Amino acid sequence: MLKVQTANESVEIPIKEDTIDTTALAGLGLVVYDNGYLNTAVCKSAISYIDGDKGILRYRGYDIEELAEKATFLEVSYLLIYGELPSKPQLEQWSTRVMRHTFIHENMIEYLKSFRYDAHPMGILVSAIASLSSLHPEASTALQGEEIYYDESMVNKQIFRCLGKLPTLAACAYRHRIGRAYNNPSNSFDYTGNFLYMLDRLSETDYQPNAELAKALDVIFILHADHELNCSTAAMRQMASTGIDPYMCLAGAASALYGPSHGGANEAALKMLEEIGSVDKIPEFIEQVKQKKRRLMGFGHRVYKSYDPRAKILKRISSRVFDIVGRSPLIDVAVELERIALSDEYFIKRNLYPNVDFYSGIIYKAMGFPSDFFPVLFCIARTAGWLAHWKEQLLENTPIFRPQQIYTGEQQRSYVPIYQRTSQTPPAVPSKTRLSRKDLPQSNF
């Protein structure tokens, strides 16, 4: 039991599974202040598990290493959403349903074509996801009522649609940026093979995406599919608590992922490696990091206090990718930087180990993806996890999210007529002595 006492009264709060129910503090007139949700659990979930001290990540009890080696992304998506690995007939039916929904409405195609030629692909994707709600009014709780998702078949249909259409919308955003006609999906390929086909086919009637690159991308999608209650997943759950349809929830989650501290972190790691340039410049860079003149991107994590298990897998995948597309000189910089950092007491003491962003950016660039497309790839993969959390929350009696705040503003004041007012100095822009966003704890990706 945890005993909390004020000047006038006290309360004993049971400790269950290393957690306390802080709503018990309300009777004492107390609230918990946790800026940025650093130590607050807002839900119970059976989807993914992390032990940051030991470097463990599991989906529904399965180690990420085993799933990355033996499963496919669609198989893992089924596991995340429904809780168990599918049987062979279940997987075949699941894959068929998802792939059937890769085709998008002609109105959506016209909508995508209306964007400027230089629009950011993530901006296009977020807008397109939100607009799916208007193309499927029968799925809108605002129009049909929340009761429609008491029907399991209705829930499943939106899951098929979202998983199926995300790669198509992403491919259209990519083609839009390079000024080429959109490609229709092809059910001749698997999930990631079809995605690469829509990205790269020109006029060939028999274009075949590289099967090894498709497999590598499939594994990367598995690694990014879910990661507990990170920023975008929390956004997904918070929006779902309002009862809005899954398309709007996905658009909100994707918007959170758009942030440079979340989905854009691998781009920052890649930029750092490009700035270092060559192995011989690493010692100088390391010294600048220690002097706090530079930041070591792609290392460290809010959750992991040891080596991110996903980074180990990506390091192996990078070798397979470079065997196909040619070795990037950046991989030599990355490997040497990792070696030095892992043997330097300065970084060991601070638990700065490579995270998932360190190698993913190098792999994406080697495969030909522009850096502003990295969060789009992340979004396709994480949609599986977002939908799993949406479905899980539908089964719970979750109230609408309504966090408390600590009010720091003025007390009651009287209105002053404009001719009696004096000019006031506006609030100052945060100075360099205050914490900037880059100094804050990084997102739980």
Image (cartoon, rainbow, N blue to C red):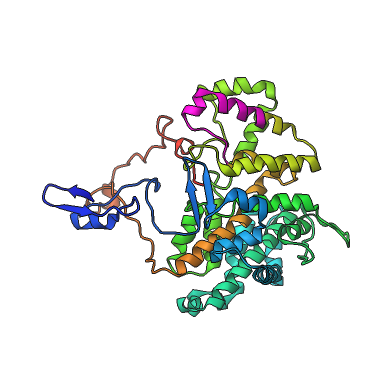
Q: Tell me if residue 81 can be seen.
A: yes
Q: Tell me if residue 114 can be seen.
A: no
Residue 28 spot, x, y in % from top left: 18, 54
Does residue 147 sit above or below 254 in this rendering? Answer: below
Left-right relation of 414 to 302: left
Say how many tags the image has: 0
Residue 111 spot, x, y in % from top left: 67, 65
From the viewer's side, name the closer residue of 27 and 272: 27
Residue at the spot 53% in from the left edge and 74% down from the top edge: 140
Residue 169 spot, x, y in % from top left: 68, 61
From the viewer's side, name the closer residue of 84 and 188: 84
User: For the magenta stretch, what is the residue range?
Assistant: 334-355
Decide whether residue 392 is among the magenta residues: no
> For residue 125, which quarter of the picture?
bottom right
Decide whether residue 346 is among the magenta residues: yes
From the viewer's side, name the closer residue of 246 and 351: 351
Residue 388 spot, x, y in % from top left: 53, 63
